[in-house]
Structure formats: structure tokens, C-alpha cells
Image: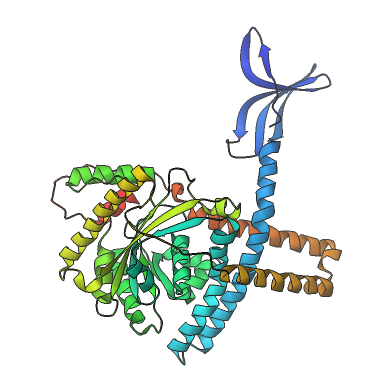
Amino acid sequence: MVYLRFWSFGGFDLPLSEVGFGQSTMFLLDWFYGVSHRWVYVFYGIELDDSFISLGVWVVVDLRRAAMAFAAAAVVVPLGLLFIVSGLIVNVIQAICFVLIRPLSKTTYRRINRVVAELLWLQLVWLIDWWAGVKVRVYTDRETFHSMGKEHALVICNHKSDIDWLVGWVLAQRSGCLGSTLAVMKKSSKLLPVIGWSMWFSEYLFLERNWAKDESTLKLGIQRLRDYPLPFWLALFVEGTRFTQAKLLAAQEYATSTGLPVPRNVLIPRTKGFVSAVSHMRSFVPAIYDITVAIPKTSPPPTMLRLFKGQPSVMNVHIKRHEMKDLPESDDAVAQWCRDRFVAKDALLDKHIAKDTFSDEELQDTGRPIKSLVVVVSWACLLVFGALKFLQWSSLLSTWKGIAISAFALALVTVLMHILILFSQSERSTPAKVAPAKHKNSGESSDSAIQDKQH
């Protein structure tokens, strides 16, 4: 940063900075705006001259952070432009198929949409595999590994990082079912430009976090999957929210006040959605994949921003397959089964913290398929060729109006990518407050109470 020197006045030091402008001296009395991760600071203060005093506003630029910001933008904007333009093309194709093909044959629509959606989602798999070089290590038995992608499955997972859903896509892509991987998500997700729209066309389930409404939405959504023509995964994050230290503290206080096992590495699962899913999927889904995601101590936590910057990380993934037919019949017993899985998951994460690995299970070789790289290179060549032809035809950059339109388009891409990155961040939520419980019980926790404490 271009720092200004401190200045002593009247016998005592003031944290004021001085810049000389001839006979004038500017005192910066206070911050108007500026925090440590910003690169532009705006100050207000007073300007003293020999004959008058006047108010002033000055801008100081942190050159180092500014350079870093522009360097990041130089990476994010081209990748964002590729993702958004190709994504809009995918959205248009999905919309056309939804209007023209789905009314005639839902099976044909699903098969086509599976291929089309992968043309978008593989770009994010490429971001992990080839751009950032994130290593996803899969620990499971060989039988489970070879079953993945060949059967319908309900997937439950701890919500450890900002990119757990992308890790799920990597696993699905390795298993050959990326285009038919679904998830239960909050309703606002479908409003996300490009990716949210693609999820809606792909029959993701969107809930409002209001069980009075969500119960029927979940039931109808699962019933529609009965005739799904290809093996699918339905992912359900039963913790209901992403893991943060503030939410863990709230979950621990809630567990202590209600007599539940106190979690150390996970949040308390909200079981209503899981119980409903099992009830409606039991007859046609043979398996539950219990996935535990952990980040080694030697690896930085992966985020969307780190991915776009090409910064590597490591994620260890433990997968245990459960037969759906082995689950208990009653709703209360299924809810307890879910809670027991998270107690076991907590213990498994304790072992991972001690050993930095899931060494009790075999490490499977998932490789790094070239398909995502081929898709991204193909999109890049297609869009660059199209852009050059368009510029040649339109002479867009030959006028100030055209330059302004181009600048606006780039700014819009930057904003959209910023929204996507912010949406993925888990630390944006405020710490939860936990009210003391009025009574204790041996395990019957209210999902609504858990939601209030952990949300």
C-alpha cells in the first residue's frame, strides 16, 4: 500500500497521515471506508492552508492488492465468460427440449437432457480436475466402487466445504452418471443464472425450508423419479446447512441442552426429509451411499474462488454403501438410524483428524478422465471462432457505443461470477443463538428447533 507517514502535532501523536501539496497539508482524521481485504480506501478529513480550513475526501489505492484483484479478474472473467455463454446455450437447448420433446416423451427428454446438461456441468468438473488440480481421494471397498453409477441411490453427506456439491459431481462423472445426478436444494438455488436454471430443467428438487410445504414437494419430486430411465443419484444434505464453527457451537449447545450426543465435526441431522425420502424411495432405490468428506490438515480448504485462481487442494472422501432393504420400517427408527450414521461419521472424522486419512478403507484409483478437458477446449474453440466472426460482421469495437456494450457485458459477467462465488461461501451466515431447552429427552429432537439453532 502507498502508506502516508504519521505526524506529530501539539506535543502528542495523532494517528494522522500527511501529504504535502505546496503550502497545504492534509490530515486524514478517520476512515470513511476500508477493510483489510479491500484494495481501495476512501478517507475524509480536513485540509489546512495558511488562510483557510476546508473539508476534503481522498482515495488511497493499495497497489499490491489492486494488482492481485486485477490478476484474479484476468482469470475469472475469461472463464466466467466461457461458462456463462456456453451455459446460456445449454439453457436454451434445455428449454427447447422441455417445450417440444418432454410433452411427447418424458423418457426421451431425460436422455437428451442428461447429455446436454453434462456439456455445462463438465466445465466445473474440469475446473477441479484440470485447472485447479484438486485431488479427490476416494476410500471405499471395491464392491461399492464398482456399484456406483450402475444403480439408483440416495446419497447422504456431511456438508464440510463450499464445494461438496462439486465433489459429488466429480464422483458422479467418474461413475458415469453425472447427467442424472440430482440433489435436494433450497428454493433460491434455481434462480441462479445458468447453473440454477440447468438444475431446474434436470429435475432437481427445490425446498423452501418450510416442512408444511416441503413435505408434498419432496414426495411428488421423488414419485416422478420412479420411471427415470437411467441410474440416478439423489443427494440429500441432512444437516440442512453448510458447516461452520459458529453452527457447530450452536449444535453443541443444542445437543447438550436436549441430551443428544454432542457433535465434534458434524452438525445435528434434520431427519424429516430423510425419513420422507426413504419412505418414498424404498420400493425402487436399492442403496444409500453414506459419504463423509474431510480435508487433510496439510491442505487449504477448497473454495470456488480458489478453484478459479487455479489453486490446488486435497479432499478425502469415504463412501459406505447401505442396502435400503436393511433399514428399519418405522419412521422413528429410520430417523434414529440417520442420527446414528452421523454419530458414526463424527467418530470417523475424529480418526481422520488423527491420521489425516481414511486408512481403514481401500484407496480407489479414480483417475482423471479427459472428457471434461475435451468439452472445455471444444467450447472455447467454438466460442472464440463465433466471437471473431461476430466482431468481423458487426464491427462492434469500432465505435464508442460498441465498446460501451462490450464493457457492460464484461462487467455483467464479473457480477454473475461474483454472485456464484458468494453463493458458495459457507461463512456468510451469522452465528446462531441457542435458547436453553425447557426439558430433556433421549433423542427425540425437533427438526424445526435444530433448523433454528443451526441455520
Instruction: Give the colour scheme of this rendering.
Output: rainbow
Report the front residue among 197 and 283: 283
Residue sitting at x 47%, y 47%: 301
Q: Is residue 52 left or right of residue 218?
A: right
Q: Residue 368, percent across and down?
A: 53, 64
**Is residue 38 shown left or right of residue 271?**
right
The answer, for residue 265, to whether it is visible in the render is no
Residue 81 in the image: x percent, y percent?
A: 66, 63
Q: Quadrant of the N terminus?
A: top right
Judge left or right: residue 190 versus residue 69: left
Residue in the image at 25% along x and 79% along y: 283
Residue occupying image coordinates x 32% and y 68%: 214
Q: Nearer the viewer, residue 186 or 70?
A: 70
Q: Is 8 in front, or is 256?
A: 256
Picture quadrant where residue 158 is located? bottom left
Percent of width and height locating residue 404: 77, 60
